Amino acid sequence: TNIVKREAWEDLPWTVGDHHGGEESDSGEHKTPLPTLLMWAYTHEDDVIDAHVKAALVDSAKLLPYCDNGEGRHCSLLIAADDTRYAEPTIDLLHRHYPQEVFNSSSYSSSSSSSSSPSLSSSLSKLGSFNASIICNSKAKRVLDWHPRSWTKEKKNNNNNSTTISSSSSSSHGLASEANEDGSIDYYLPNDFKLQEDAKGMEGAWVRFKVHGWDHDTKCPDRRISSSGSSSKPIVVIPTSFDATHRDLEYHIGTGKTFDPSDVVVIVINHFGNGQSFSPEHEHTHTNRHREKKNNRQADRQNLRYPSAVRYPDNVRAQKMVLDALGVSEIDLLYGFSMGAMQAFHWGAMFPSKVKRIAAVCGAAKTGNTNKIFLQSLKHAVMASKGWDAHSSRFTGTDKEHDTVIRAFARIYAGWGVSSELYELEAFRDLGFESLEDFSVRSYEGGFIHANVNNLMAQLDTWLHGNVAHADDKFDGDLEKALKAIEAPVAMMPCTTDRYFLSKSVEEQEYQMLEKALYRPIVSIHGHRAGDPSRKGLEAEFAFIKQTVEELWNL
């Protein structure tokens, strides 16, 4: 991308021509310091040098899953700063950087002097579903272990404006005073936050979330989202699924997608263990070089310990604290896929008056025995690896040992993640894969190769113990009693070939036990992946889920 010289770095952000909005200069003209189009894709010249050196030294085997043709010949890596536009869609970026007057004005640039020129707002409305950013540096960061400079971070540090919240202070809980670079926000839990099973609690923990469609600037998270009043947008909450983050679920959010931020406020909340909210990788005694470093305040915390047992009710209670801090008293629709769906069932049972609708995609209220066999096979593969330390119950292996166990992990996942029909019919060829091996390497190994092993193990443990019957003592371990406590209508969308959450079990248990339910199975050979239709070849599944959610809105 555009290279910024060392001597010009300190001058960022550069100011540009005349704009409507902002303060007037002595001559009466409006001059506003706004980022230029050039700045939306830039990097420090030293970062370019660093990236080339790291690329020359990286193990070629590590590049294979990322090669453009899958044959190890070409690997494209985009080098860009973290605060370039890669993290946000075009319209969101313009809304954040340009004053509203400029955004709606017909004279939005120095070259647009004609009163007949279209406004930014009207011009960008034509983007429709293409409102996306094409620039992303995450691949370069992960493959090369490369971490670019940020002029915004450096200026904050120079001005002593960065925020540090100490884990030793019981009064340090609440919303962070600044958002992270991608617009996500951290909520710090009180140090006395209690867990369902681990008596030692979760001192120093936080929950990370991101809001879409919020009328307020996400850089000021102290402002509350009102969920009451006739003029308020409906509130949608999306808990994350296994090894997914708030970024991975954004394919559902946007114009023409499942949730349009112009119509609803969408709050995507990361569950514990996924690397965004508090996770094993944040324990200071277990530094993992496979972790993607982030510009956040976790580095300032000391003596963090990830608990031995984190359950779904722990996640839900922490998420409720986030919503309370935002002023959200009621969830209009709770959408969850896989582990997200399990969290949604727990939400409905634990706080029935707070949830008006639930969409549960490829998930259930309880982890079934077939599902447990799958999860246990993954755990035992890690525990049998050379890098596993039984004393600390942590993976402490080398890079090579990490890659070896992750490849084994991914191969097990490949055997369960899609249906046997997909393999036998070789439908993976229709998805752009040349062979069974190509599909296994690029679609599964490539998806996990840079994951933190301890994060994966923590998430597996939460998933393995999922059972809404144990969400509260008042249910006495009775699944039907817990499900009948849910007041919201639940749209259940299991996939007919899912090998984790069996559609027959969902129909015979959840559907029969719930007071209000829609049973809308996804007919697909893509198995569990049908519920996460972000990939090529899943357009029909995406449309079906979107249609079912629209049906749920009418209930």
Image (cartoon, rainbow, N blue to C red):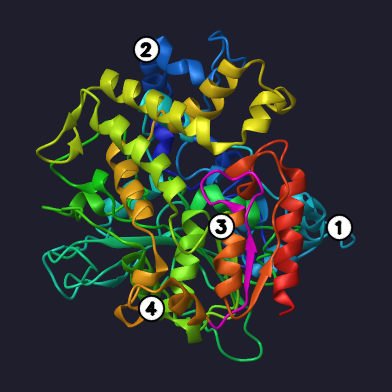
- Residue corresponding to mark 4: 325
Disc 4 element: helix
N-term-proximal mark, 4 vs 1 = 1
Instruction: Please identify the quadrant where the N terminus is shown.
Output: top right
Q: Where is residue 378 in the image (x, y as percent from the top left)?
A: 36, 36
- Residue corresponding to mark 2: 59
As rendered, which of 253 and 91 lies closer to the eye?
A: 253
As rendered, which of 146 and 334 lies closer to the eye?
A: 334
Give neighbour class at mark 3: few <14, some 14-19, many 20+ (Cα, 10 Å).
few
As rendered, which of 186 and 529 lies closer to the eye?
A: 529
Nearer the viewer's eye, disc 4 or disc 1? 4
Nearer the viewer's eye, disc 1 or disc 2? 2
| Amino acid, disc 2 | Asp
In three-dimensional space, the C-alpha distance between marks 4 and 1, rounded to whole angstroms, equals 43 Å
In three-dimensional space, the C-alpha distance between marks 3 and 2, rounded to whole angstroms, equals 46 Å
Residue 336 in view here: yes
Image: magenta residue range? 487-503
Q: In the rendered view, tell whether residue 282 sits above or below residue 287.
A: below
Residue drawn at x 31%, y 50% is: 461
N-term-proximal mark, 3 vs 1 = 1
227 relative to 421 in the view: left or right: left
| Amino acid, disc 4 | Ala
Nearer the viewer's eye, disc 3 or disc 2? 3
